[in-house]
């Protein structure tokens, strides 16, 4: 599902990264935050016609704003913008001539090691989310996707750490279950939504375990999106009483949108703010907020 028009978002993500990198280098040297991952890392949202576009409302840009009191002039550089753990490492068939996003990020991190103050990663949702449709969940596909995540995320973390050096904090994100939106489609949708909660919870547990074992700060946004909360029931405009998980995903993402947007699993501005706050709070709890002492709580996003 966060297949997300892969070729387009990879291209737009690469352009966004190049522009951000050029902007950062064309002014006085200052601190840098490198964000790498799928299209959430590029702040992608649909426009009024349902076309996905990178925005400046993504969690990296909101997190950078929260960190600038500690790191004045902090600039965000984006890498990735779509795809799976495999395509992050190897590139995609649609963009075969392009350098994989992980390789681009490694080169940038090495070239700017003294200036990089934070590295964030979100990846893996497409490995498993692509197995889920409004009609069914492909269980064999889920098993294979989880295996890819278990294999590839530790590789990605090791390579990012080696390129960034030992001083810059590395934070990894586990996010939400967009498939709760299917609850609104009748009895078959409700059964699929319930099963998706188990699938995404297993994915998030896999990611969080990999982050911790890889020496990264683990940021779990699942509870803030209530991905396990079939109860209590809460009101949702136009739909009566629904599980809290449904209300959260409808309020924080585009997954419950009417045409021409339709089901779109990207976060909206509020949802990206929740993702940003999750990462900020995880860094603070770990004593890893860049530019601040561990005892300095400060104000988050």
Image: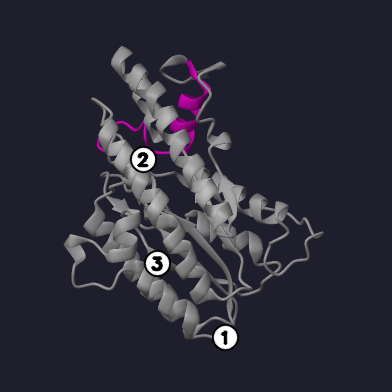
Q: Residues within 10 Å of mark 1 (few under 14, many from 20)?
A: few
- For the question of whether residue 55 can be seen, the reply is no
In space, the residues marked 3 and 2 are separated at their CA atoms by 20 Å
Mark 1 element type: loop
Q: Which quadrant of the view contains residue 115? A: bottom right
Relative height, residue 185 to residue 72 (above, below): above
Q: Residues within 10 Å of mark 3 (few under 14, many from 20)?
A: many
Q: Which numbered dot is residue 29?
A: 1
Residue 70 on image: x %, y %: 71, 68
- For the question of whether residue 127 can be seen, the reply is yes
For image coordinates 65% across by 51% down, the residue present is: 282
The magenta stretch is: 242-260
Relative height, residue 257 to residue 188 (above, below): below
Residue bearing mark 3: 79
Q: Earlier in the sequence, mark 1 or mark 2?
A: 1
Q: Earlier in the sequence, mark 3 or mark 2?
A: 3
- Left or right of 140 on screen, residue 69: right
In space, the residues marked 3 and 1 are separated at their CA atoms by 20 Å
Q: Which quadrant of the view contains residue 141? A: top left
Mark 2 element type: loop
Residue bearing mark 2: 265
The reply to whether discs 3 and 1 touch (Cβ–Cβ < 8 Å) is no
For image coordinates 47% across by 86% down, the residue present is: 26
Residue 7 on image: x %, y %: 22, 58
In space, the residues marked 1 and 2 are separated at their CA atoms by 36 Å
Which of the colour schemes (rainbow, by chain, secondary structure, one colour) is used? one colour
Most foreground residue, 145 or 228: 145
């Amino acid at each position: 599902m966060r297949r997300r028009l892969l070729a387009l978002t990879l291209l737009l993500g690469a352009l966004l990264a190049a522009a951000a990198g050029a902007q950062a280098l064309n002014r006085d040297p200052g601190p840098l935050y490198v964000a790498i991952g799928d299209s959430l890392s590029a702040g992608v949202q649909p426009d009024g016609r349902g076309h996905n576009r990178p925005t400046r409302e993504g969690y990296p840009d909101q997190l950078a704003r929260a960190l600038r009191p500690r790191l004045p002039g902090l600039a965000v550089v984006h890498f990735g913008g779509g795809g799976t753990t495999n395509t992050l490492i190897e590139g995609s068939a649609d963009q075969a001539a392009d350098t994989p996003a992980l390789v681009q990020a490694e080169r940038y991190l090495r070239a700017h090691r003294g200036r990089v103050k934070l590295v964030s990663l979100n990846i893996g949702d497409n490995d498993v989310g692509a197995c889920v449709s409004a009609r069914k969940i492909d269980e064999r596909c889920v098993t294979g996707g989880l295996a890819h995540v278990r294999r590839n995320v530790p590789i990605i973390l090791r390579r990012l750490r080696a390129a960034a050096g030992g001083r810059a904090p590395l934070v990894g994100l586990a996010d939400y279950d967009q498939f709760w939106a299917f609850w609104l489609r009748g009895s078959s949708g409700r059964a699929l939504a319930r099963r998706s909660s188990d699938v995404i919870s297993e994915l998030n547990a896999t990611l969080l375990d990999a982050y911790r074992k890889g020496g990264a700060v683990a940021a779990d946004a699942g509870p803030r999106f209530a991905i396990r909360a079939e109860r209590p029931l809460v009101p949702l405009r136009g739909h009566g009483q629904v599980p809290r998980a449904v209300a959260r995903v409808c309020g924080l993402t585009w997954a419950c949108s009417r045409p021409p947007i339709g089901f779109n699993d990207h976060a909206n501005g509020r949802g990206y703010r929740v993702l940003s706050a999750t990462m900020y709070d995880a860094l603070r709890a770990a004593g890893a907020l860049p530019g601040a002492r561990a005892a300095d709580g400060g104000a988050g996003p």
